Amino acid sequence: MARLISLGAAQLGPISKDDTKAQVVDRLIALLHHAAEQAIELLVFPELALTTFFPRWHVEDVTEFDHYYHTEMPDADTQKLFDEAKRLRIGFALGYAELAYDEAGKEHRYNTTILMDRDGNMVGKYRKVHIPGHKDPEPWREFQHAERHYFEPGPEGFGVWNAFGGVVGMAICNDRRWSETYRVMGLQGAELILIGYNTPLHYAPDPTQNALAGFHNHLVMQSGAYQNGAFVVGVAKGGIEEGVDSLAQSVIIAPSGQIIAQAITTGDEVIQARVDLDFCFTYKGNVFDFDKYRTPHHYTKIAEGPQRYEPEPQE
Ligand code: CDV
């Protein structure tokens, strides 16, 4: 019996720092309506989908940016989106900046994605593990990428959840570049990996990579899908936001590694693919039969940490 599901990626164009939450939520609802027209059952929104990508500015006191964070989800600003998704029976993944408090009342800031099912129940929450960029101001950059100032790494790591008739995992932006991200979820049986991203086309530490941004984006997600026999939905907030041009090219990728849907604009756009989650077994069941073919005793260095050799000096 096939396990069919209609997947959607809700790419967003730029969000300005002056846009209100209400304006942004209305845009997300418009994308939900496009998704409903295409009978999409699970719609994936990007990383930090409710705000401009604020880590491009460094403010010393992070609380100055508290208006970008949410302590509860849904809250008064976002309830409308959750209500409409439930009415349309569309599950969704939503990236946002989370302000959380632990049992001791200590504050934690995470770059978070939540997964909602078609009945409006929260299925899972993932907090970004690989936090790129820098903590202190770096004035030599054209714009900042101070994610390490605004977010701490998620303590829970990469989980998966039974949802939408399959096994679903989540990752956020820079996570997608690391093979371990997919493999840790793959080892837990992930069949569907949902990834939102904000990727500036200018990579300040090494601008020779700028022209390859689109290639690298697809390279890592296609290989992650193939090597783990999973579908991957990669969704951008793209276009020129506050003067910074960001990659679009949202995609839905099959376990074969093939792109089966791709955005053609740099703005708000829904792409769709109807897939059979049983297709994962085409890869998980043979070439990537982990139980049969993996040799984990040779992989211990991955967990133990780097033990690097340095190249010998040449004469
Ligand atoms: N939001 C991100 O995590 N962006 C990074 C940039 C800094 C390279 C990315 O990996 O796309």
Image (cartoon, rainbow, N blue to C red):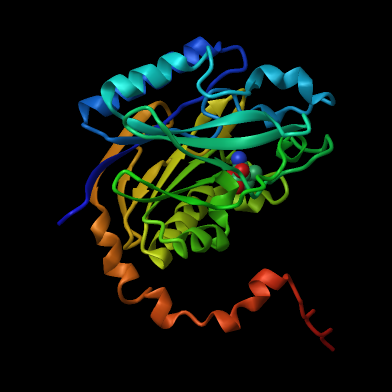
Q: Decide: is 207 above or below 112.
A: below
- Compared to 7, does 190 lie above or below? below
Does residue 143 appear in the picture of this structure?
no
Q: Residue 8 occupies which quadrant of the picture?
A: top left
Q: What quarter of the picture does the N terminus occupy? A: bottom left
Where on the image, by quarter, is ligand 1? top right
Asked if 148 appears above or below 299 in the picture, the reply is above
Task: State the image quarter where residue 36 is shown.
Answer: top left
Residue depicted at 37% across the width and 27% down the height: 120
Residue at position x 28%, y 39% in the image: 272
Q: Where is residue 220 in the image (x, y as percent from the top left)?
A: 49, 57
Given residues 44 and 297, the one toward you in this image is: 297
Horizontally, is 104 left or right of 257 in the view? right
Considering every residue shown, the one lying at the far front of the view is 103
Q: Position of residue 102 (x, y in %)?
A: 72, 34
Examine the rendering and report whether any part of residue 152 can be seen.
yes
Count of labels in the image: 0
Asked whether 189 or 206 is in front, the reply is 189
Left or right of 137: which side holds 52?
A: left
Rendered location of residue 116, percent (x, y) = 41, 33
Question: Furthest residue to the bottom?
Answer: 315
Locate residue 281 relative to residue 150 in the image: left or right.
left
Which quarter of the image is occupied by the C terminus?
Answer: bottom right
Instruction: Give the residue furthest to the left.
Output: 1
x, y percentage for residue 294?
Answer: 47, 79
Going 17% across and 54% down the picture, which residue do you hit? 2
Name the foreground residue: 183 vs 52: 183
Q: Residue at x 34, y 76 (%)?
A: 287
